[in-house]
Amino acid sequence: MAKILTITNQKGGVGKTTTCVNLAASLAATKKRVLMIDMDPQGNATMGSGVDKHHLKNSVYEVLTGDASIEESIISDSPAGYDLVGSNGDLTAAEVELLQMPRREFRMKMALATVKENYDFVLIDNPPSLNLLTVNALAASSGVIIPMQCEYYALEGISALIGTVNKINKRLNPSLKIEGILRTMFDPRMSLTKDVSNHLVEYFGDQVYRTVIPRNVRLAEAPSHGLPALMYDKNSRGSVAYLALAGELIRKTDLVSEQAEIQEQEG
């Protein structure tokens, strides 16, 4: 069964979409079965996966409103190497329509129930705000990956986000937890970056990924070519970093599974 992970931060410009696209591509490169879901009406993750958001037969909008099943909406031949449910501006209207629907917070969870057995990982990209789309993603997920820059306001912002995750855990999804905190756009030459990074590790310990994502020109250029960095320049520092992150995520997932099996046998 798939490990479903939401990639989110209420602050914009921290590398959410970059992380979602490049982590999905890196996991797929290790032969994992990956589905990426673009829950952002801007559709940047869709375009960054090499799929034209303006020519989607079905999108996340149709999935959430029930106009199409998720099976009918999955693009299984994306150039990026993973399966995709794309998004575009139509998704903006879904927020209003969802308000009138039963179990409005669980529409994505219900949709994924029919396909999650087909994947090892499902990654969900989100808009930089806490709205009904993000709540749907959080209600459907078992973990949250938080990309963040090591800058002055980051610690305050991450505290607010963790508070939101805890509320969702209590009210909608008791399985939801922080999967990991990812330091993005990392520049070790800046003393502020190192200070904030040290504070993160001090406060959050093992929840902070060992892998850091550097500032990298190739990561910034890749979306304009409709490709993950791994396919644009596999030897770039950004590509190597996301491959390392995928390895770290896989090892952590396997370890948790092994521990759960041991507990089940002992129980």
Image: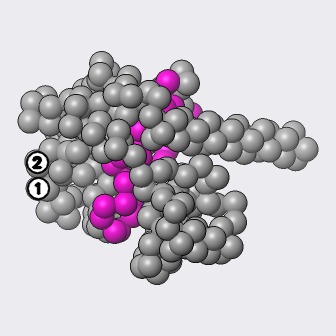
**What's the magenta region?**
1-29
* Residue drawn 56% across the image and 42% down it: 245
* Residue drawn 44% across the image and 64% down it: 149
Left or right: where 78 falls relative to 207: left
From this view, report whether residue 231 is shown above or below residue 267: above
Calculate the distance from the C-alpha at mark 1 to the C-alpha at mark 2.
6 Å
Label 1 secondary element: helix
In the rendering, which numbered label is found on residue 202? none
8 or 259: nearer the eye?
8
- The residue at which mark 2 appears reads as 90
Amino acid type at circle 2 is Asp
* Residue drawn 85% across the image and 41% down it: 262
From this view, report whether residue 146 is shown above or below residue 90: below
Based on the picture, tell me whether residue 9 belongs to the magenta stretch: yes
- Residue 66 visible: no
The quadrant the N terminus occupies is top right
Circle 2 Cα neighbour tier, 10 Å, few/some/many (<14 / 14–19 / ≥20) = some
Left or right: where 82 falls relative to 128: right
In the rendering, which numbered label is found on residue 93? 1
245 or 131: nearer the eye?
245
- On the image, which quarter does residue 233 sit in? top left
Label 2 secondary element: loop
Which residue of the protein is positioned furthest toward the top in this rendering?
Answer: 77
State yes or no: discs 1 and 2 in contact (Cβ < 8 Å): yes
- On the image, which quarter does residue 157 sit in? bottom left
From this view, report whether residue 264 is shown above or below residue 212: above
Q: Position of residue 47 (x, y in %)?
A: 21, 37
Left or right: where 264 falls relative to 102: right
